[in-house]
Amino acid sequence: MRRSRFDHMPCPVAQALDLVGDSWNVLILREAFYGSNRFEQFSANLGIASNVLTRRLRALVDSGLFERSRYNDHPPRYEYLLTDAGRELRPVLLTLLQWGKRHAAAGTDAVQLIDTRNGQPVQIALVDANSGEPIGPQHQIRRRDGALLSPTHA
């Protein structure tokens, strides 16, 4: 089944979804952030069918989130390395992970984020890079055209 395309929409969220793709792609990206870079690693860690993984990796390369690099000539084998654009998705995945722990997998401590410098738990926060102020669910933000990007219910 083909997924919907959003490249005709003049919206950065829709166009980002076109690049990121579907949920398998997000999980492949997650595994790359955990250190996987070879087909066999992605396959073993995700339990994804080979044909599906092949298509998803090709799509991630085509979208510019991964680059393919040969690491063995006989037989030819490739690794999949995050590009700058792919690495820039790290805060998005960390935020999704934290949100998922709070709302989708509540009560589980299967994944805890720990700062390697001090051993303390990490709490992801979105902040305005200009002011340093936190941007939370109640923070009022609008687009330049005046449309508010805020929760519909407080």
Image (spheres, rainbow, N blue to C red):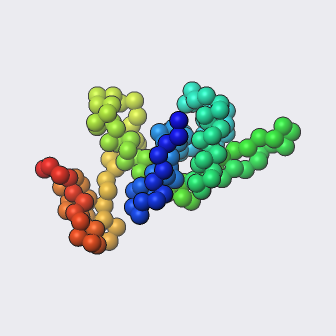
Percent coordinates x, y for residue 46 in the rendering:
55, 30
Please, which residue is most extreme toward the left here? 154
Q: Is residue 147 left or right of residue 153?
A: right
Percent coordinates x, y for residue 90 in the rendering:
47, 51
Looking at the image, residue 74 lies above or below residue 59? above
Residue 71 in which image quadrant: top right
Residue at (41, 47) in percent of width and height: 94
Residue at (86, 39) in percent of width and height: 74
Instruction: Out of 119 and 127, give the one closest to the viewer.
Output: 127
Percent coordinates x, y for residue 102 in the rendering:
28, 37
Percent coordinates x, y for residue 142 in the rendering:
24, 66
Looking at the image, residue 135 lies above or below residue 78? below
Residue at (21, 57) in percent of width and height: 150
- Residue 140 visible from this viewpoint: yes
Residue 9 in which image quadrant: bottom left
- Residue 41 visible from this viewpoint: no
Q: Is residue 148 left or right of residue 83?
A: left
Residue at (28, 72) in percent of width and height: 144
Q: Is residue 11 left or right of residue 69?
A: left
Looking at the image, residue 119 lies above or below residue 13? above
Q: Is residue 6 left or right of residue 123?
A: right
Number of numbered callouts drawn: 0
